[in-house]
Image (cartoon, grey):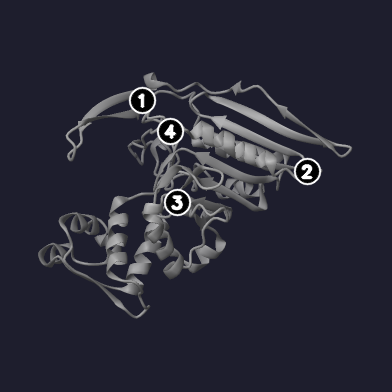
Amino acid sequence: MRRHTICVGVDYEFGGAPFAEFAGKRREGILAGKKRGEDLVIDVFDVRKGTRQTTEVRWSNGKYAVVNSDPKKIFAPVSRKSYRSEQTKDPVTGLLKTHYYFLDGQPDVMSIVDIYKHIYAIADKNPGTLQEVSIFSHGWHGGPILVNSFDDLREDANDPSRQSGIRDPDDKDGRAGKDFISPTMSPTQAKLFAKAFTTTGYFWIWGCNFPNAVNKFLSKVERSYSSIKETDVVKLSNLTKEEIEATVQLSSYLEFDPQNLIKTRSLKIPFPVLKKSLWAILAQSYPFRLAAATGVTGIGALVGTYAEYYQGDPPIMAVSSRTWKHVEFYKKYLNIEVDAEGRRYGIYSSSMLNSF
């Protein structure tokens, strides 16, 4: 038996992001790649609908049957009423844009933790069968955004429900800093998580990982150098106001005096320090933390890159061509590999962790 799990996040921007369509295409591709004699189970969780739908391929006497279950509603659905909205003016265009923020007090809406529980259940009943978990949603450095909720639980050392590391009960999204440590995931649960997967299994986050500060800094480096040696000192000069603002945000990683940068509009960084800084930023990302805690390969956008729709083969999601130079930088200088489907997502694997 081989299992695949697909999770569809909510387009909280209500702009028509076709995550459900992409999940359907992924499901179709898995079915098309079925292997003779191998039973197949595909579970699709839809956060907006609050449903789980299972498709099975069952083999018997050299023939197969595809069995689709009806979507089973096991969580509360999500709608515009699940959000509060705010309008802000775009500083460039002057146009108003509406932002949606998930409201607290919705305990029956699906959470990323429910996906973890599903994986634990597979480990208990069908260990070593889970080939893929794919999450089609918006994303950021901290993980997949299932609904655009908040982690704003105030810590209180005297309150057991507010200890450091505890997830906000109103939060549904992935959290790199909390999901792979106790109490959300104990070392025993991390082993159980890994037990569900095949030896080649992976957890794929299809959304963006786009801290713009990293994007602008890497862009400046790439424009300034066609090649960099390990012994080089990277020298950046004539930084624009935007480049200065972006680079200052990275000062704690890059180990420089931000005031000197602002004064001189230039910067000198030994290349080993630059690489060390990028590794430190990567190490805070969701797929890195997942791989480090569980040993399961994570696949996701590299820091400073973002995904676009209807890209790749088949046309679902892929890293934008506008950030391919960053991907090549990571490949060339940090020896990071990318996904085998040619979509330019980074592979957060044991070999990557060893490099770090």
- Which marked residue is nearer to the observer: mark 3 or mark 4? 4
Three-letter amino acid code at the position of disc 4 = Ala
To which residue does mark 3 refer? 301
To which residue does mark 2 refer? 38
Mark 2 and mark 3 lie on one chain; the one further toward the N terminus is 2
Question: Helix or strand or loop: what does disc 4 sit on?
Answer: loop
As drawn, 100 above or below 298: above
Q: Judge by depth and name the residue closer to the eye, 178 or 8.
A: 8
Three-letter amino acid code at the position of disc 2 = Glu
Three-letter amino acid code at the position of disc 1 = Leu
Q: Residues within 10 Å of mark 3 (few under 14, many from 20)?
A: many
Task: Tell whether label 4 touches label 1 (CB within 8 Å).
Answer: no
Alpha carbon of mark 1 to alpha carbon of mark 2: how far?
Answer: 43 Å
Label drawn at residue 17: 4
Label drawn at residue 103: 1
- Residue 334 in view in this figure: yes
Give x and y (percent) for residue 137: 46, 37
Alpha carbon of mark 3 to alpha carbon of mark 1: how far?
Answer: 28 Å
Q: Is residue 186 left or right of residue 257?
A: right
| Residue beneath the point at 36% across and 49% down | 210
Mark 2 and mark 4 lie on one chain; the one further toward the N terminus is 4
